[in-house]
């Protein structure tokens, strides 16, 4: 995958208030399997904002290229409320 696609994805994540919490660091499977090759976790301020990012025109270009460049699983997950 080209560096331009990665950069564009990062820019659109930031544009929608997202930030990387995990991006490709070493992972160790302790139970279950098989392990994912790469794990990326992005936090958005709200679930609605994550969905806006994914459906945005800004992300559409990177998404189109990614769909032909790699196989992935993408999930939206609600986080734990701050206390």
Image (tube, rainbow, N blue to C red):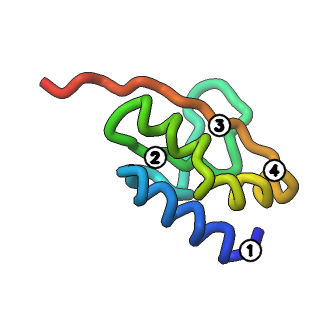
- Tell whether 56 sits left or right of 41: right
Q: Viewer-proximal residue, 8 or 52?
A: 52
> Mark 3 or mark 2: which comes first in sequence?
2
Q: Residue at x 53, y 30 (%)?
A: 76
Left or right: 7 in relation to 13 = right
The location of residue 36, given as percent across then percent down, is 68, 42
Q: Which residue is mark 1?
A: 2
Drawn side of residue 27 relative to residue 16, left or right: right
Q: Position of residue 82 (x, y in %)?
A: 18, 27
User: Closer to the N terminus: mark 3 or mark 4?
Assistant: 4
Residue 78: quadrant of the picture: top left
| Residue under pointer 3 | 74
Q: Is residue 36 visible?
A: yes
Q: Secondary structure at mark 2?
A: strand
Check contact, mark 1 vs mark 3: CB within 8 A.
no
User: Which mark is nearer the camera, 2 or 4?
Assistant: 4
Using residue 61 as the reference point, say whether residue 42 is left or right of it.
left
Q: Residue 53: percent from the left, percent from the top? A: 52, 45
The residue under label 4 is 67
Q: Which residue is mark 2?
A: 42
- State how far apart marks 1 and 4 are (Cα): 13 Å
State the SS at label 4: helix
CA distance separating discs 3 and 4: 12 Å
| Residue in the image at 45% along x and 52% along y | 22
Few, some or many residues within 10 Å of mark 4 (<14, 14–19, 20+): few
Q: Residues within 10 Å of mark 1 (few under 14, many from 20)?
A: few
């Amino acid at each position: 995958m080209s560096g331009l696609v990665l950069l564009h994805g990062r820019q659109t994540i930031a544009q929608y208030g997202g930030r990387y919490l995990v991006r490709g660091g070493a992972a160790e499977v302790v139970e279950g399997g098989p392990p994912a090759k790469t794990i990326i976790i992005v936090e958005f301020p709200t679930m609605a904002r994550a969905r806006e990012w994914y459906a945005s025109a800004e992300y559409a270009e990177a998404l189109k290229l990614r769909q032909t460049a790699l196989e992935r699983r993408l999930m939206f997950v609600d986080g734990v409320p701050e206390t």
